[in-house]
Amino acid sequence: MVTLALSSSRRVPRRRLISRSMIIRRRILLAALHANQRVIESGLSKDNRKTIERQMDNPLWNYSLAAYSNPGVAQHCLEAQDECGVDVNLLLYAAWLASQAQVLDERRSRSAMACTDTLRQQVIRPLRTLRRQWKAWPELADLREQLKQLELAAERELQDGLWDWHRQQPAPASGGSLSGNLEWVLRLAGESPAAASQRAQVLAAALSGPVMDAGWHPGRSG
């Protein structure tokens, strides 16, 4: 009985245990956030690192900011991203080329995909996965917002790299159609020709709406 009494007197209140557990979990996840930030810093070009605040003249980015806000565009882009693994930025690149009456063919699609692959695979997708996982923990809302900002910075870096690559390539052929350009990106992401054609038409219909001015949320859902 004495032993039981002593154990009871030293028992830690349940609230304190829960609080301590949350603190430990928060520290672990904060360490994970810092680790992902280091991944971003190592993935970005050391010689050409740019910050999200700079106002670089990038017609592709400016187009993306506006086009992504058209009704239905975000929904259909994110569906394509989640269902067939396509990069939303490449879809927007295809759409931008069409807005310039330029063709996105198979060769150019493959090259664009290759030049953006490192940031997409090593930075953007891991950040997106972590951000979605953290949605289940309301107490991590502030950290999740930091993840969103890191993801946005990486998306901007990818588009700037894509724009730099585009300027160094031979001019695309003229006469490109919106659905045709989108279809190549979808097919190279793994969609069958029939599925890519159908999805491209849906996306083209949304992207053909009037361009609006609004915030940019690339590849982000939830």
Image (cartoon, grey):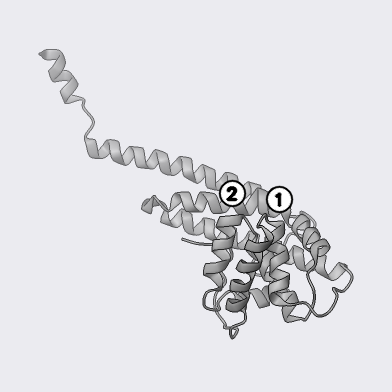
Residue 197 position, x and y percent, is 66, 67
**The quadrant where residue 3 appears:** top left
Picture quarter with the N terminus: top left
114 on left or right of 144? right
Q: Is residue 156 visible?
A: no
Residue at image x 62%, y 73%?
A: 201
- SS class, disc 1: helix
Question: Disc 2 marks which amino acid?
Answer: Pro
CB within 8 Å, label 1 to label 2 = no
**Where is mark 2, residue-wise?**
126
Mark 1 vs mark 2, foreground winner is: 2
Residue at image x 47%, y 54%?
A: 143
Residue 45 position, x and y percent, is 76, 55
163 on left or right of 220? right
Q: Is residue 204 visible?
A: yes
Question: Disc 1 marks which amino acid?
Answer: Gly
Residue at image x 69%, y 54%?
A: 119
Residue 195 position, x and y percent, is 62, 62
In the image, 124 versus 52, the foreground residue is 124
* Above or below for 31 versus 145: above
Say few, some or many: other residues with alpha carbon within 10 Å of mark 1 (under 14 / 14 to 19 / 20 or more).
Answer: some
Q: Which mark is residue 107?
A: none
51 on left or right of 141? right
**Where is mark 1, residue-wise?**
43
* Above or below for 85 versus 52: above
Say few, some or many: other residues with alpha carbon within 10 Å of mark 2 (under 14 / 14 to 19 / 20 or more).
Answer: some
* Above or below for 200 versus 8: below
